[in-house]
Each structure stands twice: as structure tokens, then as C-alpha cells.
Amino acid sequence: MLKIPTILKFPDVGEGIAEGVIVKWLVKEGDMVNSDQPVAEIETDKAVVEIPSPRSGKVLKLHSNVGDTIKVGNPLITVGDEGEKLEAPKEEKKIEAKAMEENPKEVKPEPKQQEMAQQDLGRILATPSTRRLARELNVDITKVTGTGSGGRISDEDIRNFSKAPKTASQPQTQVKTPKTIIEIAEGEQVERVPISHMRKVISETMSRSAFTIPQVTHMDEADVTELVAVREREKVPLEQKGIKLTYLSFIAKAVLSALKEYPKFNSVFDSEKNELILKKSHNIGIAADTPEGLVVFVIKNIDSKSILEIAKEMQKLSEEARSRKISLSDLKGGTFTITNIGSLGGLFATPIINPPEVAILGLGKIKDRLVMLNNQIQNRKILYLSLTFDHRAIDGAEAARFTNTIIKHLEDPNLMLVDVV
């Protein structure tokens, strides 16, 4: 018995990813492939991922071209047995047969059916578990408006829709940015630069964060003169071992101490139930500047790692993020984010929260400044801090205390139990 040809669809790779762009085919039609052999490279808003073949066999069809945007669930490739030909689905055969009877010279699917299929693909973007939840709650998923990236329907969208008054016929209201009216004067020279898929998703995420979370930024400064001395002392011998010891490694440890003292900052906000979900693990996200845009990689279980181990992992993940070869598992599960503005200059900023987290710490540059210390004017190294927090979950006084704990550990590196030998 011959195997039925297998259609590989763009899988749900997690982390709210709803679509991707095909950047490279690793096979062509007619090639023989092995099970789990990579067949395509797809760029998501997080990274470039390799998609493996679901089985061994012959590539019967590539369903898209390089540069095409595909959504989760769309067909990518069909793999079958050697000598097997790709056959049209039964529904297509019926349409073709009917069309041949009416007009032997022209074979076309019925426009209405084709249009409905296209609308269905474009409207319903949800994982199998979300579809199952819709059936359990007796919700018509075609009437639900997805609030996720690319219109993705989440479990929360289904639950909210099921709780809406039965008389309501309109889908849920989404937060949308107002349309911008572009005026270009006659004769004015312009250049239109299309944004990348990754930039598009970053834009959507930041807009959703800014328009749905009441954000406040608390600013302060830390005297890191002693920390600078420790880092300078250990930097050279570690560089000889191929390890780059950055201030971020120390700051991540200082943030960990604050998160343990104030666990509310290590949480996500459940807007449906108006609850904070406190996370027991401490996974620090680090925002990395890449040629394609901002990528946040995650140092998992940071409380079990020394500053040296954090430095090693940070260096590795940073390089992988910039090359877009980072694993999706290293982009998931963050509980608090740090972004370093000061590496490129600048003292303060108002960083935008990475939802569903409730806070993000922005680092300014370390600047020499004359300060009065012990009745003497001294030159000190000052680090500027900007903590943005979700005011639904956190008040200003709590943000000040949290920042004070970070400052206390940065000003006395011994509190962080430095282990760089």
C-alpha cells in the first residue's frame, strides 16, 4: 500500500508567532529528503528557523516562493513516495469536473467557494487547542477577532467572547493605532523603504504595549565606581580566555536580588482575571540590538548561575541573536527585561514594557561626574537607570524601593558574591 502524500504545514512554533517569511528553500521539487531533514528557512519576528521534513520521500511540491509571507497552518511542502504524482484534493476534483461539463475549455474553481476559502484562511488564525476551547465553549470562532500578532486568536479571546452579552453581534474591539495621512508635495523627491517582517511585528507589539498598558518610568542613578574597578580588574584575564565580561552580567545579578526582595516585579498581569501571576523562576531577558531590529534573548534560571556563567551565556546568545540563528527556546519565558541604551550613548530613556511582563529596566551610559563624598569633591562613575513599570500592578513607591535595591547592590559589588575566577 502506497503512503498518502504528506503536506507539511507551517507549524505553530510558539511564543505567539503567527506568520513568517520564506527566506530560503533548502530543497527543490523532485529532490529526495530524509525524515527531519531541514527543507526551508523561515524568518519570524524572533529568529530564522529551519523547518524539518515530516517524513522521508520525494518533494512533490513547494507551495510558496522565497519572499512569500505564510501564516501558521498554511501548506509549505508536499512529500510523497518515489514515482508518486501529486493529485489534487477531492474537492478540487469535483469542482474541475463540474466546470469541464459546463465549459470544456475552461477549468476554474467556483469564485464564491474560492473567495470563501481565502477569507477563511485569512480570518481564522488559531492553534488546535484554541479551536478546541472554542468548541467546548460553543463559540463561533469565525466571529472572534484575534488580538494577537497578525490577528491570531488566543484562548483569552475565546473566553472573552464567550462572556460577552448574547445580543452583541460585533466582535471584540481591538486597540488600533490611528491611520496616518501622508501628504507628499508635487515634485518632492522621496524614497519608500518597505519594513521587514521582523520590524512589522516589533511595531505591532510595541503599539499594543503602549496602548494597553498604563506605563510610568522611574529614574535614578547609581555610583558604580567600585563596580567599574572590579570589572576592569577581571576583564583582561577573562578576555584572554575568550570571555567578554560586561557590566550587564553584574547588573543582571543586582536585578535578581531586587526581584527576590520584591517578587511582584517578577510577574505577568492577567487582565482578564485582574490577577498578578508571580513567577517562581527568574529568567532575565536582555534586549539585543541587531541589524534587523531589537531581539530579546532570555537567560534562564539566573539565580543558579555565577556572574562568569552569565557572561558566557550572554555572549553566546547575543552573537546568535545578531546572526538570526538563535533557538526559539532562548527567546521564550522571560520574566523581566533589561535594555542597555547607554552602550550607544544617552543617559535616560522611557523603555516600553515587553508584554505580558510588568516592568523593564533601561540602562544609561556610565558617566564621570564630580560629586560631594565624605566632605570632599571626588570624580565618580555614575550609571543612570530608567525603570518603566505597569501602573495597574505596581505603584511608584514600590518602583522606587525596587530601584533602591538594585542601586545598593551595584554600589557594593561584594553583595552580589562576585565569582569570576
Image: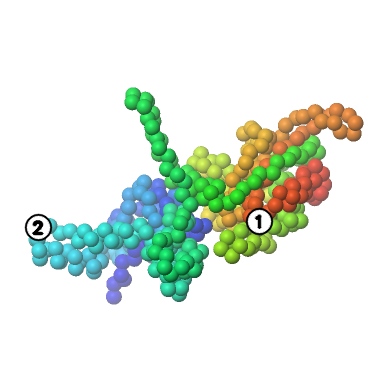
**Image point (47%, 44%), residue name:** 199
Indicate which disc residue 393 carries: 1
Evaluate whether residue 260 shows in this view: yes
Residue shown at 73% from the left, 52% from the top: 398
Q: Which of marks 2 and 1 is nearer the N terminus?
A: 2
Question: Vertical placement of 171 versus 346: above or below?
Answer: below
Q: Which of 217 and 195 is in front in this view?
A: 217
Dividing the picture into quarters, in which one does residue 281 lie? bottom right
Q: Residue furthest right?
A: 375
Which x, y percent locates residue 102? 10, 63
Nearest the viewer among 300 and 383 is: 383
- Within 10 Å of disc 1 (Cα), the crowding (few <14, some 14-19, many 20+) is some
**10 Å crowding of disc 2: few (<14), some (14-19), many (20+):** few
Would you name the residue on which mark 2 appears?
105
Q: Position of residue 145 (x, y in %)?
A: 42, 59
Instruction: Write the residue at 38% across / 50% down.
Output: 69
Tell me how far mark 2 sits from mark 1, CA to CA.
Answer: 66 Å
Q: Is mark 2 on a helix, strand or loop?
A: loop
Return the residue found at the far top: 187
